């Protein structure tokens, strides 16, 4: 058969398929076999499967391929599943099949454990991402890590006595920094055992300890354990506030990792122990040991170390000074924890309190607090700005300080109510001005105002020695006679306390009996300005009014400067500025201040010193201070009482010590006739007797003997001065009008009395 293009003249021939009579197939196309162009049914593939139904049955049994609608079911579209259905075990949407031509079995779904694992995995990833975002957000509030620095510990000032024993601490921490190597081994062990058992194993945050704490808290239904490590606690103390918030906890963890990376474990532990708060204003183990046991942390025993470690949880509530039983119970828990960790044996833990009980708490800070505060006021001027721990070596004698406090406080407690005296002060100086004892009030716990240094009060007759010294320097002597008689100055009539007058008497008698009229006469003769110059020269620094009443002590001074002004009488006439600081040493050993003795400066010549000592010694022998006798010692001094008995003074001295005592009220209210010759003399005598015990006896400097007998009329004067001249534009000194002496008076007396008239 040839199929080709029909040539001209040839007849067209069609192929024939029935040449054989057995042929039974027909390959002719029918309209049903053609593709539909009208957009009807889609094209179908011929099917030969067993389920295919023949569309035409030919006579010879042949079967035509079928393109009908009959045939196998069309596959359904994929089922769209939710995200969570996919997570719960269906990795992809399943196909619905009536059968699989490949013969493979259908894929099995995941079990419950698989789906749970997938869920937890996804949640873990999401939680990590979320947690990382939270950490990054809160950590962004911290300074850049490369610029982060541990703040310096606030400096502490340790004040020590003349013999080197600690007296007080000043500063924000309340105690010095102590290196870890100088602490007993059981001190850091106690803190690790109770606060952070895995301190040596974690990197700042203890996730195992945190989980254990959470489980314990859930079991008890309340907050029983905390999950913070020692490093986290240090981070909080160094950089953060005590606020309880998620932000602070996140920042605390970040900072803890930084501390662990930058510092070693021992350095972190040392910083923690020297900065943690223990209550009562004590920061650090040294301050706490001093506060609760009266000793250095270097000397605490194991029971004391356990007590301190137990305080960290609740410093105020568990303080041994407030709740001894609670502190002991907490310390027992610390000892048990130390035994669990192997730091001590069970037997040592059980008998720790019996074998080495804690020392009793020291008494609250007493009068030495006045000295410590005064030193802190001076420190900036001595060493400038400082940022390290300092040790201040002082001139204070702790035994004398205790005696002074006891004498003053007990006297006021016993006799103060009857005399309406509520406060007092005492200052004791060595003849060179070194402060040996200073008490600024009846009780430091009740009032921290330092009356010895800062309270200016009228000294009354205690100021008279400077008037008499001015007169001696102008040529008078202790035997010079003055008249005790009524006096009138521009409307002012100074009188003696008893309103009696003794007539002519020597300066020695007038001073020892505190005669007011004679003191005023001398002040007028030498001039108030000369009196003020003399007082300035010997050590008075307060403002003094240049009027006649200055002779009776109407200008206010402090007990400290008044004691210093008497010191030249005790040391031979040399200037003696009061001081208390000898040396200041930094924690590095560098000496920042070292007091050098000032060049000797004579302010009173030795002859006048002898005269003054002779007159003031008579005050104790027979004058207003007769109760101030000091057996075995030559002592001198002067009493003083201000107007209306508002102030009572006694300033007395030996060659060994100068002591000033003041009594009165802070509101300047009058006492009930408390005079300088009464309670102040008693306080002075009690203190000076104790202070001179065992001291080598020495005489007062300077010698003077009276040339002729004076006119001693006995105690006719008094302590209390009258009001000064009325205020005006200024005081104009009037010349004293003298009368002619009677012929019966000795000529020498007249010349001395009237200056040659």
Image (tube, rainbow, N blue to C red):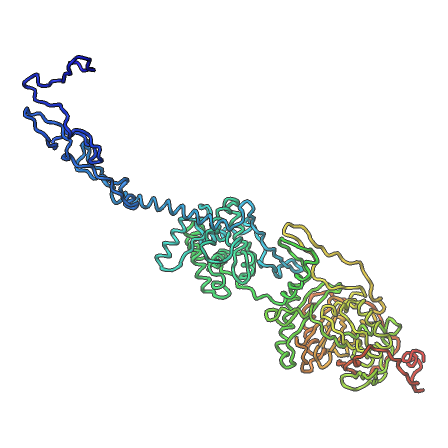
Q: Residue 174 is drawn in which quadrant?
A: bottom right
Between 22 and 268, the residue placed more toward the observer is 22
Residue 382 seen by the camera: yes
Residue at the location (53% across, 62% down)? 292
> Vertical placement of 584 versus 518: above or below?
above
Residue at the location (54% across, 61% down)? 293
Is residue 382 left or right of 251 when viewed as pictured? right
Residue 355 seen by the camera: no
Position of the N terminus by quadrant: top left
> Vertical placement of 633 versus 384: above or below?
below
Position of the C terminus by quadrant: bottom right
Is residue 389 left or right of 621 when viewed as pictured? left
Residue 78: x %, y % from top left? 25, 40
Is residue 544 left or right of 131 when viewed as pictured? right
Residue at the location (55% across, 44% down)? 146
Is residue 741 left or right of 275 when viewed as pictured? right
Q: How many marks?
A: 0
């Amino acid at each position: 058969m040839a199929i080709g293009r029909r040539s001209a003249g040839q007849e067209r021939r069609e192929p024939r398929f029935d040449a054989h009579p057995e042929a039974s197939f027909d390959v002719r196309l029918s309209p049903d076999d053609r593709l539909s162009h009208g957009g009807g049914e889609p094209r179908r593939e011929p099917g030969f499967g067993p389920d295919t139904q023949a569309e035409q049955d030919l006579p010879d049994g042949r079967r035509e391929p079928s393109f009908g609608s009959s045939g196998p079911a069309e596959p359904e579209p994929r089922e769209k599943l939710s995200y969570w259905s996919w997570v719960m075990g269906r990795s992809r949407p399943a196909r619905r099949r009536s059968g699989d031509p490949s013969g493979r079995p259908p894929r099995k779904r995941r079990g419950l454990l698989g789906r749970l694992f997938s869920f937890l995995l996804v949640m873990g990833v999401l939680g990590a991402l979320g947690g990382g975002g939270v950490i990054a957000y809160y950590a962004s509030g911290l300074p850049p890590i490369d610029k982060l620095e541990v703040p310096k510990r606030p400096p502490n000032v340790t004040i020590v006595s003349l013999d080197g024993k600690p007296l007080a601490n000043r500063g924000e921490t309340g105690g010095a920094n102590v290196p870890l190597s100088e602490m007993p081994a059981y001190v850091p062990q106690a803190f690790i055992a109770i606060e952070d058992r895995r301190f040596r194993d974690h990197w700042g945050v203890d996730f195992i300890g945190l989980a254990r704490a959470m489980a314990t808290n859930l079991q008890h239904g309340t907050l029983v354990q905390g999950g913070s490590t020692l490093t986290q606690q240090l981070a909080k103390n160094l950089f953060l506030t005590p606020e309880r918030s998620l932000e602070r906890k996140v920042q605390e963890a970040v900072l803890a990792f930084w501390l662990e990376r930058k510092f070693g474990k021992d350095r972190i532990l040392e910083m923690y122990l020297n900065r943690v708060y223990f209550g009562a204003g004590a920061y650090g183990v040294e301050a706490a040991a001093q506060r609760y046991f009266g000793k250095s942390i270097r000397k605490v025993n194991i029971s004391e170390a356990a007590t301190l470690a137990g305080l960290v949880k609740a410093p105020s509530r568990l303080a041994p000074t407030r709740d001894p039983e609670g502190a002991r119970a907490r310390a027992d828990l610390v000892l048990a924890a130390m035994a669990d960790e192997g730091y001590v044996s069970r037997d040592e833990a059980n008998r720790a309190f019996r074998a080495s009980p804690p020392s009793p708490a020291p008494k609250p800070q007493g009068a030495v607090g006045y000295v410590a505060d005064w030193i802190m006021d001076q420190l900036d001027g001595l060493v400038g700005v400082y940022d390290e721990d300092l040790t201040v070596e002082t001139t204070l004698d702790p035994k004398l300080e205790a005696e002074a406090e006891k004498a003053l406080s007990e006297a006021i407690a016993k006799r103060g109510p009857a005399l309406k005296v509520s406060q007092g002060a005492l200052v004791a100086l060595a003849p060179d001005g070194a402060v040996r004892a200073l008490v600024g009030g009846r009780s430091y716990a009740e009032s921290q105002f330092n009356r010895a240094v800062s309270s200016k009060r009228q000294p009354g007759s205690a100021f008279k020695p400077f008037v008499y010294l001015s007169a001696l320097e102008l040529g008078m002597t202790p035997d010079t006679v003055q008249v005790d008689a009524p006096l009138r100055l521009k409307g002012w009539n100074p009188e003696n306390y008893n309103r009696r007058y003794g007539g002519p008497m020597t300066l020695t008698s007038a001073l020892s009996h505190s005669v007011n009229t004679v003191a005023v006469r001398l002040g007028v003769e030498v001039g108030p300005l000369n009196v003020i110059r003399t007082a300035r020269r010997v050590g008075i620094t307060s403002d003094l009014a240049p009027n006649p009443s200055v002779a009776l002590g109407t200008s206010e001074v402090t007990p400290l400067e008044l004691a210093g002004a008497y010191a030249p009488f005790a040391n031979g006439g040399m200037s003696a500025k009061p001081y208390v600081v000898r040396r200041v040493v930094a924690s590095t050993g560098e000496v920042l201040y070292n007091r050098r003795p000032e060049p000797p400066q004579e302010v009173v010549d030795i002859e006048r010193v002898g005269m003054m000592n002779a007159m003031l010694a008579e005050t104790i022998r027979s004058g207003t201070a007769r109760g101030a006798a000091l057996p075995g010692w030559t002592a001198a001094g002067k009493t003083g009482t201000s107007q209306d008995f508002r102030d009572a003074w006694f300033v007395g001295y030996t060659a060994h010590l100068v002591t000033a005592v003041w009594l009165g009220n802070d509101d300047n209210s009058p006492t009930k006739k408390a005079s300088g010759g009464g309670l102040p003399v008693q306080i002075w005598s009690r203190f000076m007797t104790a202070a001179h015990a065992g001291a080598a006896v020495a005489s007062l400097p300077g010698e003077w003997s009276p040339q002729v007998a004076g006119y001693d009329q006995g105690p006719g004067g008094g302590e209390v001065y009258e009001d000064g001249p009325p205020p005006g534009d200024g005081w104009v000194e009037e010349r004293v009008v003298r009368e002619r002496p009677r012929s019966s008076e000795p000529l020498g007396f007249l010349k001395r009395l009237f200056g040659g008239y």
